[in-house]
Amino acid sequence: MTTLEDLKGFFEPENIAYYGASNMMQKFGSLHVVNLLSAGFTGKPFPIHPKEDEILGFKAYRNIKDVSEKIDLAVIAAPTKFINPILEDCGQKGVKHVIVLSGGFSELGNVGGQAEMKTIADKYGIKIMGPNCSGLVAAPNINITHVPWPPRKGGVSIISQSGTYAMQPMIAISSKIGTGISKIVSVGNEVNTDLVDYLEAFEHDDDTTCIGLYFEAVRRGKEFIELVDRINRKKPIVIIPIGQTDAGMRSAQSHTAAITSPGYVVDSICEQTGAIKVQNSIEMLSLLNGFDSLPLPKDNKVAILTMGGGPGSLMSDLLESHGMRVPVLSEELQEEIQPMLPETASTMNPIDLTYSDDMQNYLNEVPNILLKSNEIDALMFYGLMGNEYFKNLTNVPDYMQENESVQTMKNFGEMMIDFFIALFEELLEFKKQYQKPIILTCYNTREELFVRWLQDHGIPVYYPEEGVWVLIRMWQYAKFLQSKK
Amino acid sequence: MTTLEDLKGFFEPENIAYYGASNMMQKFGSLHVVNLLSAGFTGKPFPIHPKEDEILGFKAYRNIKDVSEKIDLAVIAAPTKFINPILEDCGQKGVKHVIVLSGGFSELGNVGGQAEMKTIADKYGIKIMGPNCSGLVAAPNINITHVPWPPRKGGVSIISQSGTYAMQPMIAISSKIGTGISKIVSVGNEVNTDLVDYLEAFEHDDDTTCIGLYFEAVRRGKEFIELVDRINRKKPIVIIPIGQTDAGMRSAQSHTAAITSPGYVVDSICEQTGAIKVQNSIEMLSLLNGFDSLPLPKDNKVAILTMGGGPGSLMSDLLESHGMRVPVLSEELQEEIQPMLPETASTMNPIDLTYSDDMQNYLNEVPNILLKSNEIDALMFYGLMGNEYFKNLTNVPDYMQENESVQTMKNFGEMMIDFFIALFEELLEFKKQYQKPIILTCYNTREELFVRWLQDHGIPVYYPEEGVWVLIRMWQYAKFLQSKK
């Protein structure tokens, strides 16, 4: 069984040797070093280079064996033919963890090259991530990838059999969903560590609350299914299958040398284990963000508090057609909230405020009453008057700039920040106190300060249609757990 | 029949009277005026206010009848009880177009108030948009809404029976999809202009290439279906139905006073007319962006050019399970492109480059060969090395800042801009020359300069899963047109 301790060289390295970094900034290896350093890595990089004496300000070495310090991890981006000789050097140096980014092995039919890699690794007791992979992230300070956006630290861990999918969606996370990441691993051709190893390690990782898998092929089917079955009862597992049609399989085969598993295999795994199958990265990262941030709903009754009828209707439709309910509130409850709403509001549920600028009622008073009652198990909002709403005040024509009221109000956004954040903090208290999921939806993204603040502190923010799906799937998972009790 | 000329006062107003603007910036009416001016409106606002002499730097009037200039349009945000008296004033002043943002009429049971509004409007020949609506956009210079983001000018027009949905998704457009907008109309309670009127006007609007509908209720069923049937053969119509379950209908009823049409009505309309039903705003705005920017595919064969195997597989899977094909390229074609690809690349289709920094080949040479051939009808990319990839160069630790190569490369992003844009311009030429759709997918959004440039010039950029759906639906529409020939 693989433990986190066995993989420590990957996730907590101090001294890292880099093959492929140079003073050419656009090169893959150079981007890697820059990304690592700008993520706040506190250890030291040791560039290994055949010609240079200094790379990016660091002393460069001709051979890893020339380094006097202990090396915890070597990262290799080099032409295929150099990889195994480099690995031999790493073995002699005593390096126990190596990430091979480069491809050109089984996925291109070079089975011999990959077998030789395994032989060398076994000889020296090296654990390899890859070859043909995209590296790893251990938030917040370890970013061994070519993608510059380091995610915020959270409880979501991802294991991917697609290098691209391991790392690229981080961009979407950073710019839109704000999912909090613990670890991301790109397993590549899995020469001697595979999906199952990382799953085993994450089962007992206290920093991991839930797990996402980009899944192409079962190499150790029995172990995999048993593991998923066991882990999923403690930490939800979300799976995206990749490579299910002829062209998809052809593509998958060419890039990880795997025989892909047809869709029905994944369906069957999910049915047996309760793991959750989704279709795409945004769904997966949104859902994992929900699992990581929120308590599970205890039953299926949802209150919708909305600044617009359309989103209220759309969310109701989706919830009610997928096993959840948006019940008409009791008369008592309706009477209690009515004084806090505009005269044009509907109190039945969805509670449609039409438009209100009373944020205290919208974000605190009404939510408190709803969450306290036993008539609902979850609360969804639509609408957030973000501070960007006031950004046009800086765009008005010159003749308006001097107007006194424009002057006064220019700082309105600034002034409102403290006020809003106090309301958000109270909302977080409600989440803790009542242990019910709270989801906010709007069409703003992380560019907006308030969205960023909420996501970073544990109130997920999505587009309305996405937020509803998160809640529906969390409820399906909660029901699954209840059925196993 | 309603023509664009009949609605000119809405879409091309010069002098606009505003009820509800004040020197309190956070008020709805004030936001409206600021948004209008910052969108580049070249006409003049006339605030009407019971007390103030000057509002936001403009002379304010006690009554619209005190204004000596001709008023093309009045916009009213005021308490319900004042609306009809204001309308009477507008009528006496000779105003022919009025937007009533305020609610409190049929949607809250105030049928009498709404009937009186209609009587006044008929007496003076006033066309009303609303009441209980969110205003309109006529890109690029007319933004009569509370949402500050003015969209870029394009050919997409949207008619919405949900005020929120009319305007809020503009935020997503602005920050993510970049859909080019011609007009957006929020019809509200439709007191004397309705969905059918605006559809009629847009049928012959040269600025409108395709139409989106947020649809809750058929008020003039026969006319509506005939119109959709006729228009959809020239300009694709995309429909989102809202309000299909008990809670959804309850919500819809409370906010537009409409009896909603169950889902099967919309399904039946789409089946009869070939209009396209989608589930949510992002799907609709993505698809309309495709229709507005791209030629239709002539057949179902797609080439995928990808920087990562995972997205290639996912896109192949989706395309092949929905009636499109990702055919293995002929040996001749494979031989022709092979020299332009890295040694680790797969040439079969998906054409998986794994990773390449030769942008000339990726964005121009290989696409030209593929598009020229008769083996494919559409081209999809995955991967865009955006200029943001180099942003971490400004985040490196201090001791690296002084390094010569870091210094040199700091401007790398800048230097690359002209180079990339020349490649993009060539790609646009291919689109014109070969008349085949080209879609780029990645996880970057409009924050990224290259994404923005491409979207604004007619190459749509989406997440991979969304881009595939756009192409599938464009192909389904193309087949529908072919079947009608």
Image: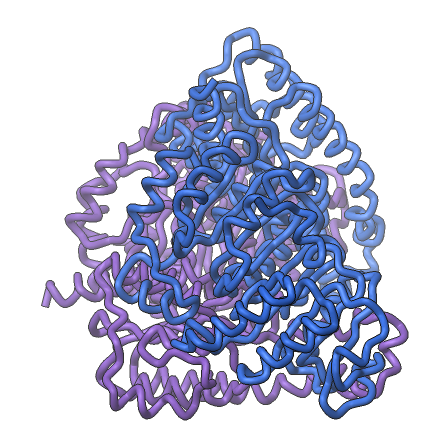
Chain colours: A blue, B purple
Q: Is residue B293 visible?
A: yes
Above or below residue A342? Residue A84 is below
Q: Is residue B190 above or below residue A340?
A: below
Q: Residue at x 66, y 82 (%)?
A: A26
Residue visible at 40% across and 63% down in the picture: B467
* Horizontal relation, residue B113 to residue A391: left or right: left
* Foreground pick, B169 / B328: B328
Q: Quadrant of residue B245?
A: top left
Percent across and percent down for residue A200 are 56, 44
The answer to whether residue A261 is above or below residue A450 is below
Q: What is the residue that sits farthest to the front in this orientation?
A: A123
Q: Residue furthest top?
A: A332
Relative image position of residue B296 (x, y in whole percent): 27, 71
Q: How many marks?
A: 0
- Front in this rendered view, residue A292 or B59: A292
Residue placed at 41% from the left, 90% from the top? B365
- Residue B330, given in percent of the width and then of the height, sits at 23, 84
Q: Left or right: B245 with respect to B15?
A: left
User: How far from the left and from the top, in percent, is residue A67?
Assistant: 82, 77
Q: Is residue A310 visible?
A: no
Nearer the observer, A354 or A176: A176
Name the quarter where the N terminus of chain A is drawn: top right
Q: Quadrant of residue B394?
A: bottom right
- Residue at horizontal 28%, vertical 64%? B474
